[in-house]
Amino acid sequence: MTLLGQRVIRGPDWSAGDVDGGEGHVGTVVTVGGLETAEVLWDNGTRNTCRIGHNGHHDLRVFDNGTTGVRHDGTDCTVCSERGIFGMRWTCNVCSDCHLCPVCYVTDQHDTHHDFTRYTTPGDKGVPVPKRATSVKAQTMGIFPGAIVQRGHDWKYGDQDGGADKTGEVISIEHGDKNSSTTRNKVRVKWMPSGSYHIYRLGAEDGKVDLQFVLQARGTPYYRDHLPVCENQLESNRAVVQRTGAQNIQESSEALQDDDNVCIVVSSANLEELQKQHCGYTKGMASCIGKIGKIRGFTPNGDAMVEFGGTKFRFHPRVLKKVYDLNVGDIVRILPDEQSVETLQDGHGGYNPQMKQYLGKVGKVAKKDSDGDVVVEFGRRIFLYNPGCCTPAPGQTVYDEDESDNDSGDSGNQLQQLENLNHLMMLMMGGLMQGVGQRLTSDLTILALYKAISEGDTSEARSIIQRDPSVINKTFKGVTPLIFASHQGQETIVEELLKKGADINIVDHLGNTAVAAAIIGEKKRIAKYLIGKGCDITVTDNNGRTAIHSAAIEDFGDIISLLIQKGCDANIQDKVGDTALHDAISKDSTNAINTLCKSQSTDLTLVNRKGFNPLHHAALRGNTQALESILMRNKGLVNVKKADGFTALHVAAINNHDDCARILIQRGGADVNSRDLDGDTPLSVAAGRGFVETSKLLIDRNANVNAVNTKKETPLHAALSQTGSSMGLGDPMLGLGLLLGLGINTKENRIKTACTLIENGADVEKRNSEGKTPLECCSDDVIKTAVNNFIRQRRSQPSASRGTIFFFQI
């Protein structure tokens, strides 16, 4: 678990007075020095060095480690349903199936008289904590929503704030989207002079902090004695070795022992720096990076003696990572640190930037190379990894983005763009380029052919094919020479293989044909050549996709036209129900969208597994070009409802896509007062989320501000209520989300939305089925006061002089 970026508070051995601002004030770990100390940048702008185990002293407690990427994949919060709890997980010892996220725990969800166990990271054994009902509860202070801030230590944005002396207000703490590996380490700020909004780092990017507060704000509460101390786990365990003489060193939850295989997990620069600080450095150590060594004992102070290729080196344990013997079918967790993974991937297929979203995630070993590298599956995505990047995670749930989709679009029906073949090519290059005659045991002829293809050596490839024609349909790592050559763009070799009888329609182990490989590899000329040669364009891969899906993803409109001309079904749906048009919309493939929408063979009414037809999907994605293209072809789709009663306008409204809403209304004639199964209109769902601009747009287009749903709630009820149906939609803990500044329904936005509704005739006395007015449904005193003040001001003004002027202070 990395320390950089952790949010911390003073701990049990604190001795630095009020440099932090006082009890409960929060700071960020920005550097780690000497392995026993850390430098903290407090939210008030001051810095100091704190002990994180030095001589057994701990000056800090960890307030939030979700900021560094700690996530419990496969374990959801029982109360708020957060998928894959970020930060510390709290499990009830009485009700073993109850797991709480940090917010639900500190806001006293579940029975506070029950004992709980804290799991600081996914791999730890858990620490029992006292009952919350009898524990000390304190309040955090610092950079939280409502704080007034100015530029800080790591500011790099010029005069974006309006100048060095200008201040802004923190509107929300930003939560990473589903592709993010960290959360709660950035904040959104509204600068006072200009009213502009921007996002800044608060622990992101290895502890960078762009701001400091001028006026602090209250954050979430915390149970002081329930939080762990901040310490470097490796250093803490080294002390155990020194005291006990035990010949092993703990690294998180894994133990290094004699005869363990290990690898170096830091860059060459960091290796030199760390080794010089502790047990010495020699130039030969850097040559060991990317290789696997074996532990041959430990020194009395816990350093490891590691043998690489017959030479022994003395390494500090912090630079090492145990390499496990993995097998197909094993469940593994990828290291959470990007720099470590990038270092380890050197010489093992390389680091793909798309790997970033899978840092710290759980996957399944799908294939093991002869040199030990493994292909790891995450649902429909695969990557090649150095085994040193993986830690066994038996029993954990494999991360699959498809399973976390939802209709509101907060997680969205994200497209799982398949570049499986690209990663397989990395696998081949990573293993093959290590050379024939090492550990590879495949037939030398097929290896030589693949080497020639990878290097574009047409003469050598032709010579090999002529000497042994049987190689043309053989596979290496599940891929035939034709598929490999098509992906690599080797036109002459592709032609030679076909002349010699290569099967043009054979598939690899993922179901990809040569034409699909060419499209995925962005080799359009080869794709057209193969189509012209009569390849089967109806073949589906293991995920139900055909070549037209791949062409849509790559935005090859001309390839799509050619495929349709040759009889390819433009409407075939993959395993999640997506058509090529769904994929094109998700990837914002403009050429593909235009081509598919113009083709009369494209069925615009097909829905995917989530119930979205292409128009709904375009509204979800905020794809205005797709909306216009679809409506130009068929305006009759504009008011078609999903199974839940949502029209495309509902979908646009709940995702704050006001530009999409405008197109749906102006170009498509969307019914602004259409109702879903709960009776909610687009205005209700927009107001319930505090989306001011979208609400204004709908009102301007004659949306009924007093429309009632099945609970007799109006949009004003939705704007002021924390439990209204239009605000929930899978988020029953919205009030708790506000404590962390989820970016949805900030107080300011809710107030502005409510005032806009009132200004446009919303009935403040309208009662719902429980007999409550909108203000009676509001449980936030600040919001209630501000809206009441607005109502009084409005009543005191002459009608002619009224305007939507917001006099409130949050």
Image (cartoon, grey):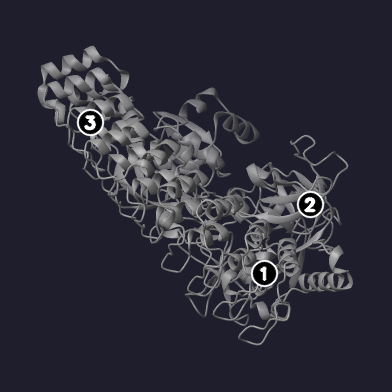
Q: Earlier in the sequence, mark 1 or mark 3?
A: 3
Identify the secondary structure beneath mark 1. Answer: helix
Classify 10 Å Cα crowding around label 3: few (below 14), some (14-19), many (20 and above): some
Write down the residue under mark 1. Answer: 719
- The residue most toward the top is 459
Mark positioned earlier in the residue sequence (2 or 3): 2
Locate residue 58, reporting x and y percent. Answer: 72, 56
Q: Residue lying farthest front? A: 800
Question: In the image, is residue 123 above or below residue 530?
Answer: below
Q: Quadrant of residue 32?
A: top right
| Kind of residue at badge 1 | Ala
- Amino acid carrying label 2: it is Asp
* In the rendered image, the vertical position of residue 142 relative to residue 281, given as above or below: below
Q: Position of residue 351 (x, y in %)?
A: 46, 34
CA gap between label 1 and label 3 equals 55 Å
Q: CA distance from mark 2 to mark 3?
A: 61 Å
| Residue at the disc numbered 2 | 43
Q: Where residue 531 is drawn, which disc sits there?
A: 3
- Residue 388 falls left or right of residue 160: left
Residue 615 location in percent, x, y?
44, 53
Describe the element under mark 2 as helix, strand or loop.
loop
